[in-house]
Amino acid sequence: MRFAVVVYRLLLRAYPDAFRQEHEASMCSTFEALARRDGAIRALAREVIDVPRSAARLRRDARVQSRNGGGAELVFKDLQQATRALFRVPGFTIAAIVSLALGIGANAAIFALVDAVLVKPMPVGAPEELVAIYSTRGTDRFPANFSYPNYLDLQDATDAFSDIVGFQGAPLSLNVAGADPELVWCEIVTDNYFSGLRVPLARGRGFAPGDELVAILSHEFWIRRFGARESAVGSRIRLNGRDFTIVGVSRDGFTGAKFLGFTPQLWVPIHADEVVWPGSEGRLERRSGGWLNLRARLSGGTSSQEASAALETVASRLEAQHSDVNQDLRLHLLPAARKVEPVIEIEMGNLVPVAARLLFGVVGIVLLIACANVASLQLVRSTRRRRELAVRISMGATRSQLVRQLLLESSLLAVAGGSLGLALGKFLVDAAMRLNPVLDFSIDYGASVGTRVVIYTALVSLLAGLGAGIVPALRAARRDVTVSLRDSDHAARRGRGRRWIVIPQLALSLVALVSAGLLLRSFQNLQAASPGFTKQGLLLASVNLDLQGYDTDRGRVFHRQLLERLRSLPSVEAASLAFPLPLDAYQEAGRLFPDMANDAPEDEGTLVFYSVVEDDYFETTSTEIVAGRAFDARDDQSTRPVAIVNETLARTFWPSESPIGRGIRTSAEERPIEVIGVARDGKYLTLSEQPRPYFFLPLRQEYASPITILVRTRGTPRSFEEALRNEVRVIDSTLPVYGVKTMEEFLGRSTAAPRALALDFSLFALLALALAVVGIYGLMSFSVSQKRRHIGIRMALGATRRDVLALFLKEAAEVIFLGLAIGLPAAWASGRVLSSLLFGVSPGNPPVVLSVVLLLVAVALAGSLLPSRRAARLDPISTLRHE
Amino acid sequence: MTPTLPMLQILLALVDGDRHGYGILLEIERRTGRRLGTGTLYTTLQRLLAKKLIEETDKRPHPADDDARRKYYRLTRTGREMAERESTRLERVVEMARAKALLS
């Protein structure tokens, strides 16, 4: 908004001073009101044209009245002339603007994403001083976090850092009087978190040493949940059943210290750990294990090498003092000035920067193609405008005036293309941000179209305008251009060279279209794939009883009560509980082997994923039990442990016998678990997976928290949400219900990534196709303009219009054919590369390839038809006379 | 002189009360569904001021609802006559179109 007002003020310079003195303030006030109403970019887009145009009109009127003008007037005259020239050729103007918009839009979007992840510094004071500290032990490959005692020792052991802060993310059960309970996410942080990161609080205070049951709200959460009321600070909220006092609200824009955008809604001090993280009793005293993420601030003048060296000393001291848990301890330091988790860079090498460069490379090429296309369109135009330019030179216009005029035209195109591209970029970024991954907490990558992106886009547009305009402008202003153009041999050669700009574009769009087609097909297949259970009529919701302070016994009572209440409702067909659900983001796995007499106990077993489910799970999800029986009330803690395996697991462990009555073990020591049933195979980790072993344990024997509630309803599942919440509220009014979604929505999340990929590729393919069409249109227009004389002669010798049309369409067909000839093998190769992502469609899938080829040929021919028809309509007499 | 379309729209917007620039813009948008650019709006206002068809007024709303940067405009008598005359003229044009069954 502020930026838009700045741009708007710049635009207002177009008016004479006197007018500005009179109206500038009220115009700004009006513009701000419009920007608030319509959005800054839309409001600005409207004014970019209107203000200069009305200014030109005003100045013209003034000139008519007073007959005197100045330097600025000249510019506006040029601008006016350029605008008019462009409006006279709407086809050309639209093609050029769309080309530039596509190229610039792709650049703006990629820049916004890369900027957010790689460039933008953390929203903390002096971010360049921030480092992350990790530890490894022995030959550990993965860097680990810190125990609280090791953190305290580290803090005291060196003065290389002015502050070291620790934090960890955790879910919380929140209760505020008069509102629904809610599951929220917090960071458990050391007392110096806010002061150490130098994040000033918008309200209240930071944590003080010894703080326990207090909390600091994120700015966003304060607005959403507390209506931005000042009285929120000092009030009490219930977290996990205990009263916490809100002592502060963080600064707007600060979204936590952690990596790829995990966004806590509030912060609690580390001494509240036992309340916040049930089961963590004694964790603050334990030296083993690592859970705290560390960020440190280098003290003034300390280089990161010196700090690393200091850490080595500290590591050996910690090892010497506590050799039992700190054996082979090593400490590592990584810069942490940016939002991307530094450890990701260790895990993935410099994948992120490489990927970023690759993306920039791709969009850079796209922009180059767009510029080449626009340049080629401009050349076509300038050959057609020869006479106009010649007349102007003869009337006394200087070469530099002509160049200025032509450059001004391409700058206008670039401004229009840039504005449109910015809107496109914003659309792309917003679309990318909506693809929240399969998680229950919120993620904010912080990518948005802000000032930096606008500036970047403006620069790119400027470059594109110059890039697309400079060559045509210089050539058009050369006097001998007419001579050289008359040399048809020369022109024909140039035309041939020009083909090689267009042919790769056609090939590239073929590759992109085929890839997009394959991915779309694969996505359709995924959606149609059966997960092994019913998708319709199911509503899911989760509760976390641990956070609510339930022990196992109370939890079991809750399970029983809830299911009884749900099942007694007339709109409920079946209800059950499970954790985790197959295809959920989180999965449990255990080593498993069949219980056989001759089985060696040191056998490592097979890693098998499993789920803990309540009676009626199989009925609720319509999962068929193909042998034996489902779980029921008999399978509780008083009897032997039982399990239900899927068909693949049964086949793997007992290829030739019935699995019913057999045993499985999770370790050599534990009692064998008796198999009582076999369930139909389904999908468990991804929809595209091959059949894999899986088993189910009864919730009555294996307690689980959190847990997902499944309800099959008679009506639409969404309409049951309130009833479900109500039943939970009757049993425990302070228990948050979260993750309410239908089974279809839940499954939609597991196809979100393939869907995003297919959409991205489709967008890219459309972009490539659009550019290629503009390219071939430009090529054919050029060819036609070069061969006017040729056409005239032919027609004079008896060629019909149809012959001329055929002549040019044949030329276009040659180019298209060459594009296909290069593109098809490349498309096949790219299909092979994609094949691991494809589901149920082969890389060379004939329907996909065939329809893409037809589409491309049709669209490319349509693009060439326009100029070819123009050729066919030429009047031979006037053409020859003209030449 | 014949006023241009934006001129007439602004004059008509001021017939039933004084408005500031943004208010005029909203009124025209409400009546016609089309939004004038701010450039067109203020250059046209300038022209109308120069021709004394409208004038600035000192009457302002309650300070709480006001933006000090705004200016309020009022139709002058000449302006009102001009709006009437032009509307009558257009009405005749429309009648003519009806008579030729161009409009129903």
Image (cartoon, grey):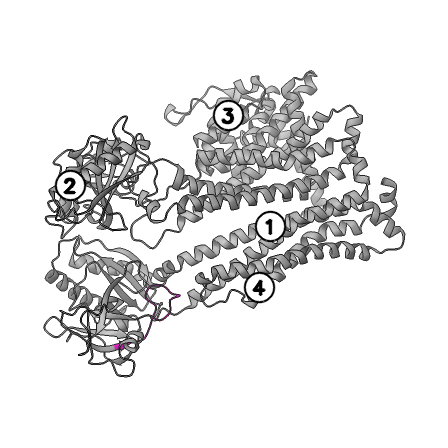
Looking at the image, the residue that sits furthest to the bottom is: A657
Q: Secondary structure at mark 2?
A: helix
Residue A429 locus on image (x, y percent): 45, 45
Residue at the spot 63% in from the left edge and 42% down from the top edge: A372
Q: Earlier in the sequence, mark 3 or mark 1?
A: 3
Residue at the spot 43% in from the left edge and 30% down from the top edge: A2
Q: Nearer the viewer, mark 1 or mark 2?
A: 2
- The residue labelled by disc 2 is A318
* Front-most of residues A403 and A425: A403
- The residue labelled by disc 1 is A770
Crowd class of label 2 (few under 14; some 14 to 19; many from 20; radius 10 Å): many
Please say if the residues under marks 3 and 4 sit with CB atoms less than 8 Å apart: no
The answer to whether one can see residue B102 in this image is no
- The residue labelled by disc 3 is A9
Please say if the residues under marks 1 and 2 sit with CB atoms less than 8 Å apart: no
The amino acid sitting under disc 4 is Val
Chain of the residue under the numbered disc 1 shown in the image:
A
* Front-most of residues A452 and A658: A658
The amino acid sitting under disc 1 is Ala
